Amino acid sequence: MPDKPNTWDIALRQFHEVAARIDLSRGLRDYLSVPEAVHVFSVPVLRDNGETQVFTGIRSQHSFARGPAKGGLRFHPGVSIDEVKALSMWMTWKTAVVNVPFGGGKGGLICDYKSFSTREKERAARGFARRLAPVIGPEIDIPAPDVNTTAEVMAWIADEYGHYVGHPEPACITGKPVEFGGSRGRDSATGRGLAYCVDRYYHNKDRSLEGQHVVIQGFGNAGQWAAKVLASMGATIIAISDSRGAVHTPDGISATGAVKHKLESGEVAGMPGEEISHEELLELECDILVPAALESCITADNAPRIKAKLIAEAANGPTTPDADAILHERGITVIPDVLANAGGVTVSYFEWVQNRQRYYWPEEKVHQRLQATMRQSLDEVQALAEDKDVPWRTAAYMLAIQRVAHAVEVNHPDF
Ligand code: NAD
């Protein structure tokens, strides 16, 4: 499709547009437009049928300028070097937007992980971890869960890393089970952080979330928690979808009821309400649209028909650059992914801090600190967007790129 360019091309285009706007020097542009390191590994995995199959593992470390690289590991057949590079660059901007002292990284294992047996999953994760161990660590690069990688996968990787360094080191990875050094509140952090952002957006307009109509595309971890927390703040969830279908209930859906239904039946279809198409869901009349599923689902094709007044991006990269321009022209505010979904990485940072301190916080403390971070970050992005009269994504990138560039200038002898 003409409006669905390669993910790395999108990441570069977004970077260069902002770099030009803030007059970034040629050297810094060149430096920040490539990852600091990209590791590609072969990962042999013994399958249950006795054969050994070799998969490709990737870890892209886009920037160490503000601290260790940070970002997820996705195990999926669609993973590519370009995708991982783009996602690692976006992580650099995301950690900088919320001002946590990390850089950006991302990794992946190219495999149909979902089809593996539990034993194969463990062998693949541990095999990849043994290859990763020399290039990750609490002060170097701290991976986290992403597509198809769970808290259990994180625990396997932490265990392998512990063997590599000769002692347990939970701070080498985040998203671990709570009993194994994970942080309370990490599970809900992305959806909760998004809800805190949206709440702050309305607060800054002297309005409340009470009665605002919300449409959620994608009902996994991020979408479910966004729905639950937004509903608890007074918003009305009027439509949700997952990969199999979409349901519209103009009078409102119970968020907890929907989560229960999805948990029990594995899908949102079958809930009370009218079944609609994926395309119709995105174009529903509503106040807030939360894309929480896939990349590039809001394109130049459907952007003219989007009726939401506010889009809060839970997913990474759900809006293409051409769609962004159309939405801006139409006066629709987009709280960009690097801000709206940064709750996850923020609580990952809290997890790393707790691991380093060997001192664990109550869940309420995690929520409070997350709320403070999201509110401050939203205020900073909004102030810059209004001051420079630019879309919020541009403002978030301006803030982030300036912070990263400043860190490079301060630390690197050649800049
Ligand atoms: P998940 O796998 O738990 O959920 C994804 C959901 O999207 C599922 O319900 C799936 O059925 C649905 N989906 C897939 N294709 C769809 C389609 N065509 N239409 C509608 N729904 C569809 O994943 P998640 O952790 O919730 O992540 C969702 C997005 O949020 C991803 O882009 C991810 O990168 C991003 N994100 C997640 C986190 C996190 O902490 N979970 C953090 C930052 C960003």
Image (cartoon, grey):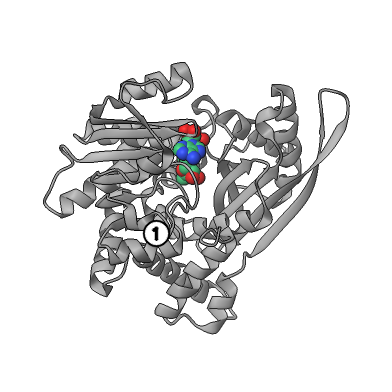
Q: Residue furthest left?
A: 206
Indicate yes or no: mark 1 CB to ligand 1 under 8 Å.
no
Judge whether residue 98 can be spotted in this image.
Answer: no
How far from the left and from the top, in percent, is residue 375? 27, 51
Residue 368 appears left or right of 155: left
How far from the left and from the top, in percent, is residue 113? 68, 33
The local secondary structure at tag 1 comes to helix
Amino acid type assigned to the residue bearing label 1 in the image: Val
How many residues crowd mark 1 within 10 Å: few (<14), some (14–19), many (20+)?
many
Residue in the image at 62% along x and 64% along y = 35
Q: Residue furthest top?
A: 264
Looking at the rendered image, the quarter that the N terminus falls into is bottom right
How far from the left and from the top, in percent, is residue 378? 29, 55
Is residue 387 depicted above or below 236 in this figure? below
Give residue 389's quadrant in the image: bottom left
Looking at the rendered image, the quarter that the C terminus falls into is bottom right
Give residue 246's quadrant in the image: top left
Give residue 33's quadrant in the image: bottom right
Is residue 343 depicted above or below 126 in this figure? below
Residue 262 appears left or right of 166: left
Q: Residue furthest right?
A: 51
Which residue position holds label 1?
Answer: 97
Viewer-nearest residue: 126 or 136: 126
How far from the left and from the top, in percent, is residue 128? 73, 41
Residue in the image at 23% along x and 29% along y = 252
Residue in the image at 46% along x and 50% along y = 297
